[in-house]
Image: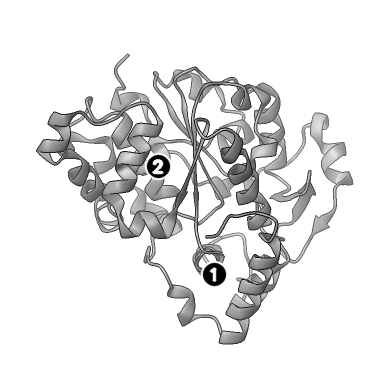
């Protein structure tokens, strides 16, 4: 079935779940019993080892219980501010490269998060039926740790691509985004954000546990999960385009390679291009949720050497039992 642009629609940013009131008795008692972190307004709860916005937990639980993937779905996974928007744009464009020309592409009018909706967001909004209206093949996104995915996703044939990024840059990007949360009467300082991050007390954190779940599973199921590192993708985007295409079962033909299509997709989905032609989502400051600098090493402009060394030490300790590095 051909993907029609009309089947896609603008979606609110995932952060809207913070404004959802938890009234569903099915989950309210459970949520009220979970450990709470009040330093990160409007409050986080720890469920199964991971901190979540307490108002997002019903959507996460409903997704885990009820979501059924299609055999040709592709799941894009990430810890927040790790390159999610970029990976969504690349994966969607690669998957549907025979449906759209660059001059009439949905990304010219819609944000990558509209083309690749977050599964848990629509469950939180009780709008999960929208996901069923999308024609196959679907590309869907999630920030949910692997252990909290539905069993139907884990046992399905649909591939999962997980992108990860240096935690130091993640903190900086996350802090800039959180400063734009309209529900924060007083935005968190960088020091406060840093301390909470180091403790793992941020949405879907700790980051190390989130990434390690996907990485560990990728070792035993390399055809199921592909790990993409942000720094490597930035260094050689064309190679990442080919890796993604091969992994999701859409390899480039010799003719496509010869025509330069790989490089054209990498350029079309480059950070600067996405930031510039994402016109519709600039309203209401939504663009600033998704795009800032997109570079490696910006943490040096915000952290003292002591802060950076401390976080590197924590990261090394958290990853010491694995071969994974950012």
Tally of numbered discs: 2
The single residue placed furthest to the left in the displayed view is: 259
As helix, strand or loop, the secondary structure at mark 1 comes to: helix
Quarter-of-image position of residue 74: top left
Please determine whether, in this image, residue 297 is positioned above or below residue 75.
Answer: below
Observer able to see residue 186: no
Residue that numbered label 2 is attached to: 88
Residue that numbered label 1 is attached to: 168
As helix, strand or loop, the secondary structure at mark 2 comes to: helix
Residue 317: percent from left, percent from top: 70, 66
Please determine whether, in this image, residue 77 is positioned above or below residue 179.
Answer: above
Q: State left or right for residue 89 relative to residue 160.
A: left
Q: Residue at x 36, y 24 (%)?
A: 7
Q: State left or right for residue 116 relative to residue 242.
A: right
Asked if disc 2 and disc 1 are in contact, CB closer than 8 Å, the reply is no
Observer able to see residue 127: yes
Residue 50: percent from left, percent from top: 73, 49
Quarter-of-image position of residue 122: top right
Q: State left or right for residue 19 relative to residue 43.
A: left
- Which sits in the foreground, 313 or 273? 313
Residue 113: percent from left, percent from top: 42, 42
């Amino acid at each position: 079935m051909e993907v029609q642009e009309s089947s896609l629609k603008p979606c609110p940013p995932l952060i809207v779940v913070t404004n959802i009131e938890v009234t569903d008795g099915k989950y309210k008692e459970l949520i009220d019993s979970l450990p709470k972190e009040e330093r990160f307004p409007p409050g986080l709860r720890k469920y199964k080892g991971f901190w979540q916005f307490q108002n997002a937990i019903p959507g996460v639980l409903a997704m885990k219980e009820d979501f059924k993937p299609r055999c040709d779905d592709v799941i894009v996974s990430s810890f927040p501010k790790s390159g999610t928007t970029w990976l969504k744009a690349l994966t969607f464009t690669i998957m549907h490269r025979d449906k759209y020309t660059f001059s009439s592409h949905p990304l010219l009018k819609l944000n990558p998060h509209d083309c690749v909706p977050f599964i848990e967001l629509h469950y939180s909004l009780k709008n999960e039926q929208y996901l069923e209206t999308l024609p196959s093949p679907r590309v869907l996104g999630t920030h949910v740790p692997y252990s909290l995915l539905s069993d139907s996703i884990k046992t399905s044939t649909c591939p999962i691509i997980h992108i990860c990024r240096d935690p130091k840059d993640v903190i900086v990007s996350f802090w800039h985004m959180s400063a734009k949360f309209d529900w924060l009467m007083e935005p968190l300082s960088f020091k406060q954000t840093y301390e909470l991050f180091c403790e793992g007390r941020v949405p879907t954190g700790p980051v190390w546990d989130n990434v390690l779940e996907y990485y560990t599973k990728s070792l035993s199921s390399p055809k199921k999960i592909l790990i993409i590192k942000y720094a490597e993708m930035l260094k050689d985007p064309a190679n990442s385009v080919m890796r993604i295409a091969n992994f999701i079962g859409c390899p480039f033909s010799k003719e496509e390679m010869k025509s330069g299509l790989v490089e054209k997709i990498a350029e079309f989905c480059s950070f600067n291009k996405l930031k510039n032609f994402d016109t519709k989502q600039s309203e209401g400051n939504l663009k600033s949720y998704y795009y800032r600098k997109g570079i490696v090493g910006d943490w040096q402009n915000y952290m003292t050497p002591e802060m950076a060394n401390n976080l590197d030490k924590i990261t090394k300790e958290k990853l010491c039992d694995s071969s994974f590095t950012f």
